[in-house]
Image (cartoon, helix red, strand yellow):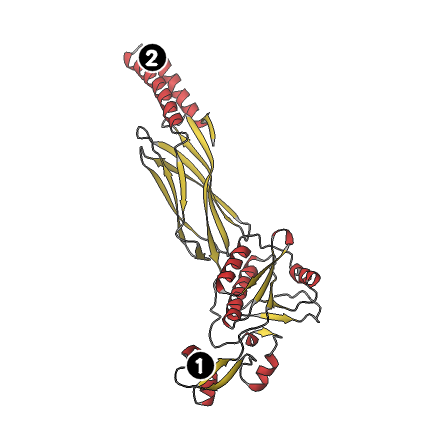
Amino acid sequence: MDKRLRLNAEGTIGFFAVSVIIFWMWRFFRSYFLFVAILLMIAGGIISAVCLWAVQEKIQAEIVLPSHRMGKNADVPVDIRLTNPLRLAGFAIDVTYRCENLFTGSVEKKREKLWASPGKGEKLHRLLNSRHAGRLKVSVEECRVYDFLHIFYLAYREMGDAEILACPAFSDGEGEVEPCSYIEGFPGENESRKRGVEFNPDYEIREYSAGDELKNIHWKLSAKQGEMMVRERLSAGREKINVLLPLGDNLDENDALVESLYSMCRLLLFREYPIQLFWQGVNEELCSRYIVESGELENALGEILSTDGRHVPGSAEEQMAAEHPSESCILVKTGVFRGVYISCQQESRRLDF
């Protein structure tokens, strides 16, 4: 905060102009009332400056968001609360606040005029909306507090901030679907097509018996067979699956890729596949997180949406091939649960979505 009293150009010019007019009227008319008016203006300016000086470190700003998560294109209420503890005077306040999407890099600034009542304050209520996914950071960039004559002001900067995560529209990956049904080239895809059922080497299909959980019923196969069939797990462990998120420079496409990533990973976790997730972060660095539960997926998603997601198309695939040449991976594509399985024997290539 700048602790010095600064002159407000517009207010100073107006105050000086009125003072000059009253002074010349007094000299011409020699009126007692005009003389008193001049004294009151001088005293008012001094009192106004003293009151503003007294409150210099007591004006506070607080940003209140309803939750830590919202959907993109959803209106979320944002409150900027300003408090004025001085009971003797109110103050006019100019608030400049900004909303920055850390994932897309977009910044929006707005300026609002408020009046902080004596001993109370004021609340600025606005609706926040983001067309794209990302972590939104709302901050009070500058707050100018004026005396009641608008001659002086105090400048406050970086008074507070708050963040909220704007998430893409997600599809639920849990249910009667298998990863191989939606990932091109995923191991087991060919066997699945030949048998006409979803292939999964870690499950055994058998008839329903009393006590079986409803979530284990294979509804699609049961409809074909005409009797209740249950899918029973044979082994607890699975080999981890590498998933690569190839972010580019198209914001709408990046939204769609994050949607596919989340839905696909939810599906893989539901089938108890461990996931090694790769994506490009700051300075094109290839980031990685090992995920075995939904909470870790949520944290990784927060990391992805909290850094600039604009990258050169195709650079993630090239970097993955250079740093992990012996690793196979699923390359996320746009569309629900979509992906392309790239084997380590294949040359990593750029794909246009």
- Asked if residue 131 is positioned above or below residue 2 in the image, the reply reads below
Q: Earlier in the sequence, mark 2 or mark 1?
A: 2
Q: Report the amino acid beneath label 1.
A: Ile
Query: Which label sits on residue 26?
Result: 2
Residue depicted at x 46% and y 82%: 218
Image quadrant of residue 32?
A: top left
Residue 323's x, y, as percent? 69, 60
Mark 1: few/some/many CA within 10 Å (<14, 14-19, 20+): many
Judge from the rendering whether residue 191 lies leftward or rightward of residue 140; answer left or right: right
Residue depicted at x 48% and y 81%: 231
Which mark's residue is nearer the viewer, 2 or 1? 1
- Asked if residue 207 is positioned above or below residue 263 in the image, the reply reads below
Label 1 near label 2: C-beta < 8 Å?
no
Residue 233's x, y, as percent? 50, 79
Q: Report the amino acid beneath label 2.
A: Trp
Residue depicted at x 30% and y 30%: 87
Judge from the rendering whether residue 87 lies leftward or rightward of residue 141; answer left or right: left
Q: CA distance from mark 2 to mark 1?
A: 97 Å
Nearer-the-camera pick, 238 or 32: 238
Single out the residue that lies furthest toward the left.
33
Mark 2: few/some/many CA within 10 Å (<14, 14-19, 20+): some
- Asked if residue 65 is positioned above or below residue 237 in the image, the reply reads above
Provide the secondary structure element on which disc 2 rests: helix
Quarter of the C terminus within the rendering: bottom right
Residue 162's x, y, as percent? 45, 47
Query: Which label sits on residue 217?
Result: 1
Residue 219 in sight: yes
